[in-house]
Amino acid sequence: MRKVVGIMATVAMLVCFAAGCSSSGGSGSGAAGSGAAASGTAAASGKMKPIAKDKIKVGVIHITDPAEGAGYTYTHDVGIQAMQKEIGLEDSQIIRKNNVPDTDPAKIETAMRDCIDEGCNVIFATSFGFMDVCEKLAKEFPEVYFSHGTGYKCNGVNFNNYFGRIYQARYLSGLAAGLQTKTNKLGYVAAMDNTNAEVTGGIDAFAMGVAKVNPDAKIYVKVTGSWFDPEGESQAAQALIDSGCDVIAQHCDTTGPQTAAEKAGKWGVGYNSDMSKDAPKAVICSVMWNWGAYYTAAVKSIIDGTWDGTNYYGGMKEGLVTLSDLSSFADPKAKELIEAAKKDMLDGKFNVFDGVIETNDGKKIGEEGKTLSDEEITGKINWYYKNVEVK
Amino acid sequence: MDMLIKFVVAAVVAATPILYGTLGEIMNERVGHINLGVEGMMSMGACAGFMVGYITDNLFLALVAAFAAGAVGALLYAFLTVTLMANQNVVGLTLTIFGVAIANFVGFYMISRSATKSLKLPENITSALGSIKIPLLGDIPVLGQVLFQYNIFVYLGVIIAILMAVYFYKTKTGLNVRAIGENPGAADAAGIRVTKWKYINIVIGGGITGIGGAFTAMITAGGVWISDCVGGLGWIAVALVIFASWKPVNAIWGSLVFGIFRILKYYVPKNVPVPIAIYDMLPFLVTAIVLVANSIKQRKDNAQPASCGINYFREER
């Protein structure tokens, strides 16, 4: 009898060992484009079971409070609400955990476990720092779907990432901004420096849009070093205005840069949500996220069983990123140019980072006739376009 | 030259909320109470000032509300520390957590009730908060631009600082109040009403702090309500009290120095190869140096009031 138990224990150990190997092989995949590599393990471990609509319970992990009225968390929550309406979920089928600091793994884990304890089988984690905890818990709860925003990891089974081609909308906003400027100096308040590919790629796309319509204009960048800095963002915008910029674009969370522009009688390009309600006399247009496009598609795929656990990288085509309507004081030529460029994007004729791109330190990026891969766009843009100057 | 003028103007604007916070804290520490609730009282003032301005469209009422909100926060602090003799640091920290949270709570509530999901101050107030050019003096080239073209908060802050200096150093009451801060037992024996003057100073200090908060909500944030709009300035004010060696007039130029540090990273010429985090550290580095310098000099009039942090209990003296 003892021998039998011994053999069973050994077999069990071996099985665990093998399982451990295969799961570690599936995790830690690289940038957004590499989801396919990880999906190999998905086939081995079997597909996720679809969940009926009335059995779905969604847990949302927010970094701040959606009630802030503009900015990052608000736009995510508007997306969740759109998904709820579109799919027809009850209020009780959605749980929100607000103000979860994304630098504190213990708190993130508690928030997610709370959701799962309350019966959630789908978790949407909206901030970059939630990524590693998602990855960890996805192993522990294989029956729960984990979907993490603005990162790059996935396991090809029950944990994926979603993000978007915000640079497409930034390019279009650059067209409007380039036509608008009278001083040929445009300011850009950036949260992070060139170590962040999302911010840097956004600046480049904006700059390329500007260069397309106004080759003489230059883009001046100020970095605040924080995603949310109410005082610093206004001060950075003021410094740009002081140095002669008359259009202020931004990649940061508060409306500070737009209100600073309005106060100084200048123009601006908003971000996240439509900021024309905050600075109606300044905002030419806003670069916006429509997260509802993803949330709806994701929950639908869970219901009908088409979820594949690979990374999602949507753009204009999927309706994930959009440009708000142009304001009445926008240059009259802007509308037509934007429509044309947008059409080319939707047709796949134009992808912003096409061909050879000149950087501001004289390097050349990309190849003629090709476009940058998603992996490069999400992880490797650390250069600025030729008309950008970082101060 | 033009850029330099703009730099100074931006520095003064950055300095103003810190000046109010510092003046409020000096009022507290002069009667022997370290109030770490500056951030909280600023937040309460920010919220009350903004919301009253938003609803009534009246700048005067908004300022009164900001003062009142800061004063109410300080009154709580005074009751707990002066009357109930609770630990000053604990009460101050609690006041900060409470003040920031209640400001955000009210902000969220108001936003959720608004039609556009955004709160913007009425035009009347934003235009009243624009720069006021002082007649004649404002027309002097350079000097006029640097000194006499600011919004109302800036002038008010400097006036409060000067009045406070007169109060502390030129009036008998001020002398009494300073005596309380140095040695409340001796002041009590001399017939000074310690509890009364502690209350008065702490509450007025809180009110001044509250106006500083209103500045962040109404001017820095550009007239749109943003959660956490005070964003740590209260803590800088606490450090600045040390930098100003507990003197109101020093607070004026001290806050200007800190204001310069706050915006330096956006105005330094490009290609200065230092990480921008350095600039955020500078004010605190300078404060540490001033602390060390003062302790080496051993000058009594630059020192912290001696009874700071210790509650006064008459029967224990």
Image: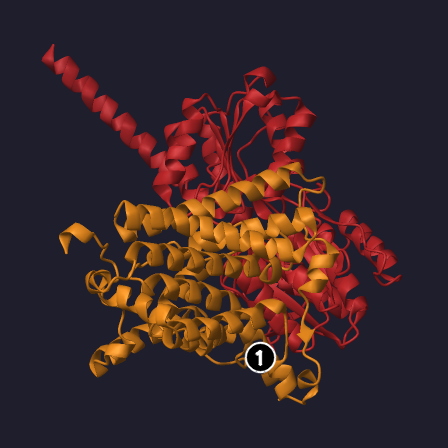
Chain colours: A red, B orange
Q: Can residue A255 be seen in this view?
A: no
Work out whether A88 lies above or below A157.
Answer: above
Compared across the picture, whether A339 is left or right of A229 comes to right
The residue that disc 1 covers is B7
Compared across the picture, whether A255 is left or right of B189 comes to right
Residue at 62% x, 41% y is: B110
Compared across the picture, whether B280 is left or right of A352 comes to left
Residue at 31% x, 31% y is: A18
Residue A208, x across and y down, in percent: 71, 66
Quadrant of residue B132 within the rendered picture: bottom right
Q: Which of B57 and B187 is in front in this view?
A: B187
Label 1: few (<14), some (14–19) or many (≥20) C-alpha neighbours in 10 Å = many
Work out whether A103 lies above or below A140.
Answer: below
Q: Which of B5 and B35 is in front in this view?
A: B35
| Three-letter amino acid code at the position of disc 1 | Phe
Quadrant of residue A257 within the rendered picture: bottom right
Residue B44, x across and y down, in percent: 49, 50
Residue B278, x across and y down, in percent: 41, 72
Quadrant of residue A312 within the rendered picture: top right
Work out whether B106 lies above or below B15.
Answer: above
Question: In which quadrant of the rendered image does the C terminus of chain A lie?
Answer: bottom right
Question: In which quadrant of the rendered image does the N terminus of chain A lie?
Answer: top left
Compared across the picture, whether A382 is left or right of A172 comes to left
Secondary-structure class at tag 1: helix
Q: Can residue A174 be seen in this view?
A: yes
Residue lying farthest to the top in this orientation: A1
